[in-house]
């Protein structure tokens, strides 16, 4: 493996590789590649986010974040159908980002929940045909972030639309360049035809979209700030694999608490002028994190850093913990109830089918 190839390897592969490599020289090469990759990635992210903020306004720096998430994901991932159609679809998802979050924030909680459900469901159907790729972890996350960082000023809105258009072009173009030689049997029409409540994929997409939106709706009715944190917790826990659901539920609350505690310790220990850098530190450490637990800890840093100017330190910590705990518990209970109801409906349909066939 060349040094460049080593820089392309994900953290989940590179860390075990470093651990198992016996050659000192080779181990040093892998460690250097791993560190350099994360440093360059962070510098690139900072440059992009800063550029978007400078061009489109500070309130639209989140558009730079969404663009970065898309670029880093779709350099390697795909959405399981024809590359040209997929490129257009990715840009269309950015068009959803332009409309959905803004429109949903204009209405009351119940109608907002319905609007978000429709748009999230569309995103899941178009981009999560192969659920093993976990594209929802980036695209639904991006949608929720844009909902949470809303804009009200008309000029800021125009800039957000322009920024998302440019971001969508960048992500779709990089995706096409990287994937253009890959041949897929599926077309977009096949993806749409495969939407069927009788298959596990569509049922999971429905479960995820409904779970995210109902959890945020309850949070809003309880007047909780930052309900996007609740939705993100739901998105993280409600997975197609039951073992993953159980594992993430058992770990998310504890490690959210540890993330808040570690943030508080660092925030209290360093000079005031360096506190805004804690979010950046979290971004660096996420790049070095190979496990879900550590990712939960360091993902808290960015969210808390952005929330403190609005909620204060104590408020941000309390809401992060409260929303994280509520989102996690709700997701687990909801997941079980959804499955029980689905099993009863399936069983009843089978009985009716057998009875009908018997009568015929």
Image (tube, rainbow, N blue to C red):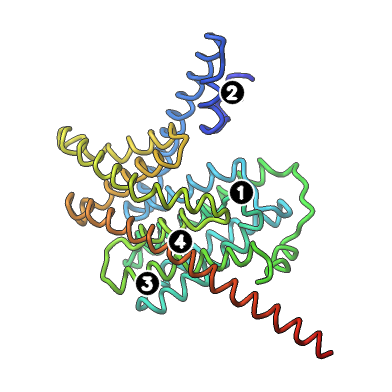
- Label 2, on which residue? 4
Q: Which mark is residue 133?
A: 1
Residue 287 falls in image quadrant: top left
Let me know if residue 326 appears in the view.
yes
**Left or right, residue 77 beside residue 37:** right
Q: Nearer the viewer, mark 2 or mark 3?
A: 3
Looking at the picture, tell me which residue is in the foreground, 9 or 154: 9
Q: Earlier in the sequence, mark 1 or mark 3?
A: 1
Where, quadrant-wise, is the N terminus in this rendering? top right
| Dot 2: element | helix
Looking at the picture, tell me which residue is in the foreground, 196 or 176: 196
Q: Is residue 267 above or below residue 163?
A: above
- Could you tell me residue 294's position as x and y percent? 39, 38
How far apart marks 2 and 3 lie (CA) works out to 46 Å
Residue 156 falls in image quadrant: bottom left
Looking at the picture, tell me which residue is in the foreground, 274 or 153: 274
The residue at 45%/29% (across/down) is: 40
- Label 3, on which residue? 217
Q: Earlier in the sequence, mark 1 or mark 2?
A: 2
The residue at 42%/71% (across/down) is: 214
Q: Nearer the viewer, mark 1 or mark 2?
A: 1
Q: Residues within 10 Å of mark 2 (few under 14, many from 20)?
A: few
How far apart marks 1 and 3 lie (CA) works out to 28 Å
């Amino acid at each position: 493996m060349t040094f460049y190839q080593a820089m392309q390897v994900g953290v989940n592969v590179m860390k075990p590789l470093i651990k198992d490599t016996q050659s000192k020289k080779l181990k040093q090469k892998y460690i250097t590649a791993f560190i350099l990759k994360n440093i360059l990635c962070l510098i690139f992210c900072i440059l992009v986010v800063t550029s978007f903020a400078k061009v489109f306004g500070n309130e639209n720096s989140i558009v730079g974040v969404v663009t970065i998430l898309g670029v880093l994901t779709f350099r390697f991932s795909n959405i399981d159908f024809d590359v040209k159609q997929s490129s257009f679809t990715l840009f269309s998802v950015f068009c959803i980002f332009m409309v959905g979050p803004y429109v949903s924030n204009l209405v009351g909680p119940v109608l907002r929940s319905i609007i978000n459900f429709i748009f999230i469901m569309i995103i899941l159907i178009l981009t999560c045909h192969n659920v093993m790729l976990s594209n929802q972890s980036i695209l639904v996350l991006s949608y929720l972030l844009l909902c949470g960082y809303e804009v009200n000023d008309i000029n800021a809105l125009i800039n957000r639309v322009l920024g998302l258009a440019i971001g969508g072009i960048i992500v779709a173009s990089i995706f096409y360049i990287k994937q253009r030689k890959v041949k897929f049997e599926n077309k977009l029409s096949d993806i749409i035809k495969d939407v069927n409540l009788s298959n596990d994929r569509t049922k999971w997409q429905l479960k995820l979209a409904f779970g995210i939106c109902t959890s945020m709706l309850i949070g809003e009715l309880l007047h909780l700030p930052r309900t996007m944190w609740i939705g993100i917790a739901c998105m993280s826990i409600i997975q197609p694999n039951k073992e993953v659901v159980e594992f993430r539920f058992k770990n998310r609350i504890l490690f959210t608490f540890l993330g808040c505690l570690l943030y508080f310790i660092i925030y209290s220990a360093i000079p005031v002028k360096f506190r805004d850098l804690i979010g950046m530190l979290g971004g660096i450490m996420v790049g070095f994190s190979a496990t879900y637990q550590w990712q939960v800890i360091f993902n808290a840093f960015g969210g808390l850093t952005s929330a403190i100017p609005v909620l204060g330190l104590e408020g941000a910590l309390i809401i992060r913990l409260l929303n994280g705990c509520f989102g996690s518990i709700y997701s687990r209970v909801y997941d079980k109830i959804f499955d029980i109801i689905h099993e009863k409906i399936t069983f009843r349909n089978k009985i009716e089918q057998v009875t009908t066939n018997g009568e015929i």
